[in-house]
Structure formats: C-alpha cells, structure tokens
Amino acid sequence: MWAPACGTVDVVVDGGASHQLTRSGDGFFAGGMPAADAGTRYWFRLDGERLRPDPASRSQPDGPHGPSAIIDPARFRWTDAAWCGIAPHLHLIYEMHVGTFTAEGTWKAAARELTELAGAGITTIEMMPIAEFSGRFGWGYDGVNLYAPTRLYGEPDDLRAFVDRAHAAGLAVILDVVYNHLGPDGNYLGEYSADYFTDRYKNDWGRAINFEGPRPARALFVENAGYWIDEFHFDGLRLDATQDIQDGSDDHVIAEIVRVARRAGAGRQIYLVAENEPQKTELVRPPESGGYGLDALWNDDFHHAAVVSLTGRREAYYTDYNGSVQELISCAKYGYLYQGQWYGWQKKRRGTPGLDLPSRAFISYLENHDQVANSVFGRRLHQLCSPARHRALTMLTLLGPATPMLFQGQEFSSSAPFLYFADHGEGLREPVRRGRREFLSQFASVSDPEVLPALPSPVEEETFRRSKLDFSERATHAAAYAFHRDLLALRPTQSAITSPLRVDGAVIAANAFVLRFFSGEGDRLLVVNLGCDLDLNPASEPLLAPLARTHWALVCSTESVRYGGQGTPPLRANAEWHLPGESAVLLRPESGPPQHYDDRT
C-alpha cells in the first residue's frame, strides 16, 4: 500500500482484528494478513484513527464508503481461450449503460440479451463506466474505486460471466474508463497521498490527476488499463474526455496506457478508442510518427452535422454546423470537419490535421449517451425529425466508411429517453441539479418559461427508471428493428465499404449527394437525397458513372415497405434516375443487360 501521507497504516479485517504494516522509505507499507480468504472484508486504518477502503480494492460490497472485500480472480472458469477478438475494420459498436439496458439493471440480465445483439449484427459492445461510484444510480463517470466493478450491477464474477458469454456469442466488449478525474463522493485518494492530484492544470470536473508526480500515483491509473483486459478479458477501452488527461512528461500517460493495454491482451485484438473534444488526431497516429497509438476517435462533427440536417436546430454547440450535404460528404471522406480552422462557438481554432487518416479511425453515430441526454428532455433523435430522413441518415451512418456506433435501443427506435441521472449524498443533490440546469442553459430554447419547470430532475430515481429500455418495442417497432438489423448484417458483406481503396463524394443536387466506394472487387454507390423527389437530369457527376460493361443495381433502399417506406421506383439504366424524397439507396455494379434495357438506344 502506497501511503506516503500517513505515519502508520494498519489492516483491519472482519471482527476487528488489526495487523500493522511496516513502512519502507519510499512511502510503501507492507505486511502479512493471516487467515484471509475471498470474501474477507477489510479496511486500512490511517494514522491510527481513520478507516478507509483500499484505493486498489477489487470489490466494494457496500459502496465506496464501506470496507473493501478480497476477490479471488482465479476462481472464475473462463471458456473463451479460443477468442481472438474483432478485426479493426469490422467493429459495429453498441454503447450500453448496464443500469438502464434491462429492467433489472444487472450484468446477469444484460447477458441474457447478448445472443439477440449478436443476431442483430452488433460485433462490439462499449460498456459505459463501471468503476464503483456512490449512490443507487448514475452514469458511472463519477467513479472513485477504479478497480472495483460497481456492486449495483452484481458481483465481479457476474461481469466476468458477461464478457465470457459475449465472446461465446462472437461479441467483443470494450470498457469506458475515466482517467481524467475522480468523483466528488467517496474519493479518499488524497488521504493516502496529496500527489495523486495537481493544481497545475485546469480540469472540467474537479482536480486534475497528477501524471507527472511520483511513479506510484501514475501507476494506479496506468495499471488499471491492463487490469480490466487481463482479469476481466475486456477487448479494449474507451478513454473518456482525454483532453483532461494532461501530462507534460516525455512519455505521455495515454501512450503508456496504450502499451500496457495491448500487452495485457496477450495476442488478442485490443481495440482502443478515445473521446477528445479538441479533436487531436495525434491520439490515433502510431508512436513512430509522434502519436499515442489508439485505434479510433469519436467524431462529434459527424453527429452535429447530422443532427442539424435532421432537425434544423443550430443552438449552442451546433452553431458551427449547417447540416449541409457537403458537410456530410466531408465527414465521410475526412473524418473531422474541424482540423485546425476557426470554431466560432469556442472562439478559437479547433482540431488538428487528419486528412490522411483511414476512415475507420473515426467513429460515427447519430446518438450516444451525452447527445441524447443533451436534447433537453432526453428524447431520441427519431422523435425529433422526419422518419424517412432519419432512415436516410441512419443508412449513411451504418453503411458509411467510418466505424458505426449505435446507442442502446436505437436499433428498435426506443421510446425511452436517456436522461442525466446521478444519486449523490444530500449535500451534493442541489449542486448536481443546479449544474445540470446551468449546462442546458446554453440551448436558447431552455429559456422558454415552459421548459425549465418541466426539466427532469437528475437526482430523482424516477429519472433513472424512465431511461430503462423496453424490449417489447422490438416487436411494436418491428420496421425500425428490421431496418437496423438488415443494414448491420449487410455491412460486413460489403468489402468495398469496410475496406475501400478510397472514398469520394459529390453534391448532385441542393440536398442530395453521392458517395462512391472504390474497390477492386466492385465499387459501391451510396446515394442520399435529403430533399424532395429528385429527377436527376442532368446527371453530369462522373462518380455516378457505372464501371465498364456494367450497370448499377439496387442493393437496398430506405424506402422499402419492410422498413416503413413507400417503395422505391425501379432504377432505369437508360433513363433519368428518379430519387424519392428523403431517401437513400446503396447500389452495386451488375454485368449484362440492365433491367428495362432497350436495344434501340
């Protein structure tokens, strides 16, 4: 135990037996604890008076203010020895909050849905944070015991069983981890050493973590990355808000986390993702090029452009987006829209160059936990726009060149909102409520006198319960579910999309565009019309031209009756194209005489 701030440290076990640890010169305390076994609960007693949980506790059965419990990770019998992971170009990500994914809100209940998710075409689950946090419910971003899976979702072996069952179903599982701050309730690290934190850097959520100080302070976080992959067989990590993981060391802590995580994978495919609001592309560049070596970045630019296109709303951080078809083309070709240009909302330049990065290095989504909750009432995007337009941009997301991600329930157009909720002690309830209102005040519509009284309170249990999914909607929203399942099943079969030689795009009308996926195995054409019905005449864009001795044939259309559409007119090779309003189609080359071929032409 590293506790340089303490004069003495004792271990106090069940029944009150105490064992004094011996201090060494570097601030470490060590000693034996006889007759301890899995399940034994214990405290550290600091300076003879304060009982505190273990900062590296593997279990907190009573929450972050209670005693720690010994866990034997070797007791679980894994069955995934043959599991190698998911190839980088085949990730189809599904973001999951375990507490609201099922009515029970446990790993055991969530595990029962894994076969259904795999059957729907998902390949990768991204689990929102699970490090122990205070209260009865929360998003998980206020974790304080980094090594302890929260008691709210079950036992640590329930989590192991979830991952093991996911691998049996062909699903990878990555974990959202928070290394930029610790929560405000139950954080006792400062009592062990003041060097865990620093005031050298500003942090959006509290005191910054000190990655430039003593090695043990840094190691608590670095080793945690390997711990989840080694002891729980996670297939990777998503690093939250990396802009607040600040480190002036020659070896940046994120680069070290990447190395430790990959080493812990022991030959498995390890997938490492980052959220980075300033859009720093060095995160996904290889170390030999001065980068940190991650695999992919969340792309908020795509989300913001798509939301403006769908809803027409440009409040707050959507100000710098027009929702134009050119923005959507640029996202498909280049990932981030802002790669160093002036960003009016923040009144500064944003982003770094990424024109050379592969498309799969960017993760595109129409929904995630933040963005759904930031729609004021937590409404899902399909509830805020035209159904046909929503299907068109869903096809762009799932069949576009970037790595796609869905948020839980999105695949069947869930009617459940996803709201912000956090259960802290009485002293924090009002600050949490006030902070949420202040955050949402950036949206001008919140100033409507009808809105503020109607905002869900983040500290009430009902807000949490309203966010739970109802899987009966898979049947009641069958058209939406079939649409998402079909696209998810289609994507891996299209090597031109998952591994294109290059992608190009062009505007073909004021509200319509084409993306062409060039491939040695036959190009693919994705045509999106976000305006009214379009008769494409003239059709002077060369990206529309078929390959030699071929014509374009329909693969799928968002206007299929199966998906709730109104039908798609036949694609006539020797006549002008008619594109239904607010629709998208995927086309492939087909040899031989085209349908409706007329030999007089």
Image (cartoon, helix red, strand yellow):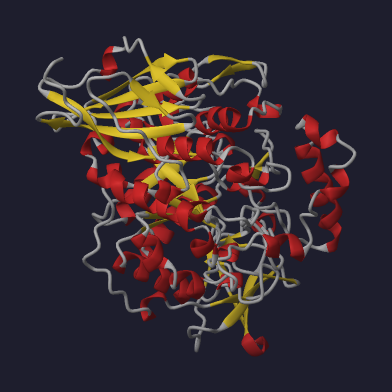
Residue 79 horizontal side relative to residue 73, left or right: left
Relative depth, front residue between 46 and 500? 500
Q: Is residue 252 above or below residue 483?
A: above
Q: Position of residue 321 (x, y in %)?
A: 59, 22
| Quarter of the image that includes the C terminus | top left
Does residue 84 appear to the left or right of 349 in the view shown?
Answer: left
Of 415 and 26, nearer the camera is 415
Q: Residue at x 73, y 72 (%)?
A: 48
- Compared to residue 4, the image places residue 150 above or below, namely below
Q: Is 129 above or below relative to 599?
A: below
Residue 197 falls in which quadrant of the image? Answer: top right
Is the N terminus in the top left, top right, bottom left or bottom right quadrant?
A: bottom right
Task: Please state the horizontal and vertical placement of residue 342, each as a whole percent of the image.
Answer: 59, 13
List x then y, in percent, for residue 134: 69, 64
Q: Residue at image x 63%, y 45%?
A: 383
Relative image position of residue 214 (x, y in whole percent): 54, 46
* Residue 432 in sight here: yes
Q: Residue furthest front?
A: 600
**Image point 49% across, 15% down: which residue?**
510
| Nearer to me, 592 or 101 | 592
Say whether residue 482 is left or right of residue 39: left
